[in-house]
Image (cartoon, grey):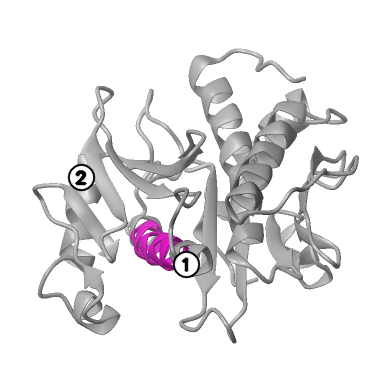
Amino acid sequence: MEHNPVIESYNLPEVYHLGYNGTHFEICLNPTYWDKYIRLAGAGTPYATKMGPTYIPPSIFGGKFGFYGCATVINTPEGFSCIRIPALTEKGEQDLKMSLHTFGATLSSVLFCLNHLLYLAHDAKEKAMPGENFQLFAVRTHVGHNPAFHKVNLSLATSLLSIEFLTRFGSEYSFLDTTEEMEDHYITQVARDGEVVRLLPRAVECHFYNYGALFFRTIGGERVTLEVLPEDFSNKMRCLSGRNVETVLQQFNLLVGVASVWQLVRDGIRLGELPTFS
């Protein structure tokens, strides 16, 4: 996995955080970074031109953007700009796989831009002020242009602060709430494909191990995981890579798990309280 500034910096300010509300991924960032995002990927930029005619650039006025306008951005009462991207298709859609591919390509585009801003913050030696949130994780996704031929994948960088928090409060726990969210997401999408699935025990997993690594597993013919691979050992177990991820559904299901753990750690650090582990 390519080196990521999140694992190098203890106090990097939060550029974005990832959540999941049961139907959509929610990527929240403060308005300063949303303005920078628009300057990077908005109308008339080289990035927007490169994305092609199906890409609707983000606007200072909010509203829809992304491929075919599948993403929306709103302002939250907490003062964040919140990007919402569907994590599930709607019932009755003509081509569910193509819709998921569009959602996945848009999410990948958003994360590419935000991680670029993360690098800029790191290069500028920005530091979180007292009382501000820290960048705890950084996630990257890849979705090929042709869903029939190009595989998908994802990776996760974990900060030292998040690992310290999980080591203190989460070691040897099974994240049952996270697992249930992943199971619900997978079953709901499969049902919309007109199929029925009964998940076997441990078909979906989320764990944190004593040596400091997260592990996520979802459904697939082979072992479909987000975990530390041998080539990532040099990064002290803080870089996770997707393994045998072949569909956007699998990618999204793993991301549901990532979003759940991300919010758990973020809330625990922000509130200074011990989180509730199932």
Residue 170 placement: quadrant: top right
Residue 114 screen position, x and y as percent: 36, 58
Q: Quadrant of the C terminus?
A: top right
Q: Which residue is mark 1?
A: 95
**Residue 107 highlighted magenta (yes or no):** yes
Q: Which mark is residue 118?
A: none
Closer to us: 93 or 228:
93
Identify the amino acid type marked 2: Thr
**Residue 95 vertical position relative to residue 82 in the rendered view, above or below:** below
Indicate left or right for 64 with 239 as reference: left
Q: Secondary structure at mark 2?
A: helix
**Residue 171 vertical position relative to residue 140 in the rendered view, above or below:** above
Q: Which residue is mark 2?
A: 32
Indicate left or right for 9 with 164 as reference: left
Mark earlier in primary sequence (1, 2): 2
Q: Does residue 161 appear anywhere in the picture?
A: yes
Q: Nearer the viewer, mark 1 or mark 2?
A: 1
Closer to us: 266 or 207:
207
Residue at 61% x, 43% y is 188
**Residue 35 highlighted magenta (yes or no):** no
Q: Secondary structure at mark 1?
A: loop
Residue at 68% x, 59% y is 239
Indicate left or right for 152 with 230 as reference: left
Residue at 74% x, 36% y is 179
Closer to us: 175 or 3:
175
Residue 252 placement: quadrant: bottom right
Query: Which range of residues does the magenta coloring cover?
Result: 101-119
Q: Quadrant of the N terminus?
A: bottom right
